[in-house]
Amino acid sequence: MKNILNTIFKTALFIATLLVISCDDKKQKENENEQHSGTLKKYEPTWESLKEHETPEWFRDAKFGIYCHWGPYSVPAYKNEWYSHNMYIEGNDVREHHEKTYGPLDEFGYKDFIPMFTAEKFDANEWAKLFKDAGAKFGGPVSEHADGFAMWDSDLTEWDAMDKGPKRDIVGEMAEALRKQNLKFIATYHRHWLYAWYPTWDENTDASNSKYSGLYGPKVPEGTFVMAEKPTTPLPDNEFNKEWLDRLKEIVDKYEPDLVWFDNKMDIIDEDTRKQFLKYYYNAGLRQNREVVATYKFTDFVEGSAVLDVERSRMSEGKDFPWLTDDSIDWKSWSHIENPDYKSANRLIDVLVDIVSKNGNLLLNITPKANGEIPQPVKDRLLDMGAWLETNGEAIYGTRPWKIYGEGPTQVVEGHLSEDLNKENTEKDIRYTTKDEILYAITLGWPKSKLLFPALAKSKGYYDKEVTSVKLLGSELNLDWEMTEEGLAVQLPKQKQGKHAFVFKIEGK
């Protein structure tokens, strides 16, 4: 008996020793992972520490990215991407449409669109090639929208694109395909909207069935139903906060995104949890040897700790900090719908030029169909942008703002969701960018008479060089020009050169 006890004791001691060694090895690897180029630079979960993170130059140089709202909400293709929310609201026309088309909510809920979201024509390499041809420098799909369906191969939920619907790792495929095209990969995240997105208290709907809580979210009190314009009360509990963070950590670890973009309403997540994410992500960038970017809206992160993003809007003046606009190619929706209203390529290019002149970047959303096809009108507009950037990209990529962003009569209306208030630009609207001592003057239309750049007048004091050369990008014609008291006057070719914004390359000594 004594020998048996000794044997058991020695075996237990051996196993315990192995566990200690294993834990030590794991801890050592974690410490080694935090080493970056031999230097330990670790971010802490404090705003002071997180504000030390600098926006990388690749982001400041890139200027243009593409992402896409694509998920089970693309199946009904009705109204917009809020279908999953509005279908549960009594009196909403989306609910009326849903019940007429698919049946009562206790028989056909949002979950029932997932098997119909098969993505049979999705080709990540084709999408990535289109993004590249459009002139984008970064891109990716929505990782998870407010509907609660994860578009990656998640170990944390069965309600993901690998287990249901497409049964493919959409995020993983796009990350690989985009990087093959030398584009930066981004992950966008809306999960904080899930809390009270569905009426989980309503027994007349499938959303109340605990069997589907992995998709519809936790039970919340009646009246908590989320609204865009009102704060959510009560706020999510610790369990929801933890799950929100755990999913982000999984995305960061599995796919190593170069940029993580957040929708607004992130302020319903506990502040410490938000700081924990930035700490984790910025430190992951160090150990993965990548320069990373996080974005936020309103005051969801502290100013200076990440890049500010403004939705469907622009800045009215130039800024001394880099920022981002996210906007959709469709005036009405962020996801594919049956009756889209696409913005023109001319509008999209003018918006890009205006944003870049003010120290911003554009993240343009496109709208794939549920089967994975990108509509031809969307492709056409992207390829128009790409053709313009092929000719004029030197005035966009890698540039920085000039002393003034521009001049002209058309003023930008600033503010959340204000883009539809902004008028089309005219030939009198000029935007400026600069790079390598070169000034680029971009007219947002072909001038009908003489072309004058008033900002270059010596009396204005902005341009302190003697102009030596003026060229129109995309044209081999020699241009006549002269410096007058009114500004730089340029004689235009008789025939219009190009289709969209026109870039004049001005060199001086």
Image (tube, helix red, strand yellow):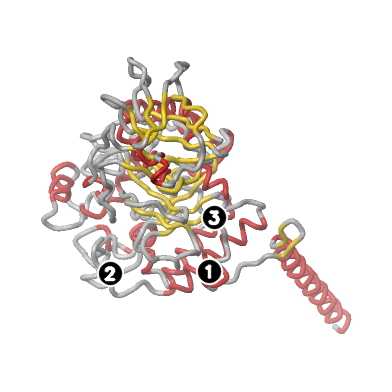
* Closer-to-camera residue (356/326): 356
**Label 2 – label 3 distance at C-alpha:** 30 Å
**Label 3 – label 1 distance at C-alpha:** 19 Å
**Label 1 – label 2 distance at C-alpha:** 22 Å
Q: Amino acid at mark 1?
A: Gln
Name which residue lies at 36% across and 21% down: 492
Pick whichever of labels 2 and 3 is earlier in the sequence.
3
Q: Which residue is mark 3?
A: 55
Q: Nearer the viewer, mark 3 or mark 1?
A: 3
Q: Which residue in the rendered view is the most extreme toward the right? A: 3
On screen, residue 3 versus residue 373, left or right, reads right
Say the numbered circle drawn on residue 379: none
Q: Which residue is mark 2?
A: 231
Give SS at disc 3: loop
Dot 2: within a 10 Å radius of its alpha carbon, few (fewer than 14), some, or many (20 or more) residues? few
On screen, residue 301 versus residue 100, left or right, reads right
Q: In this rendering, is residue 4 above or below 163?
A: below
The x, y position of residue 182, in whole percent, is: 58, 36
Dot 3: within a 10 Å radius of its alpha carbon, few (fewer than 14), some, or many (20 or more) residues? some
Q: In this rendering, is residue 277 above or below 454?
A: below
* Closer-to-camera residue (344/200): 344
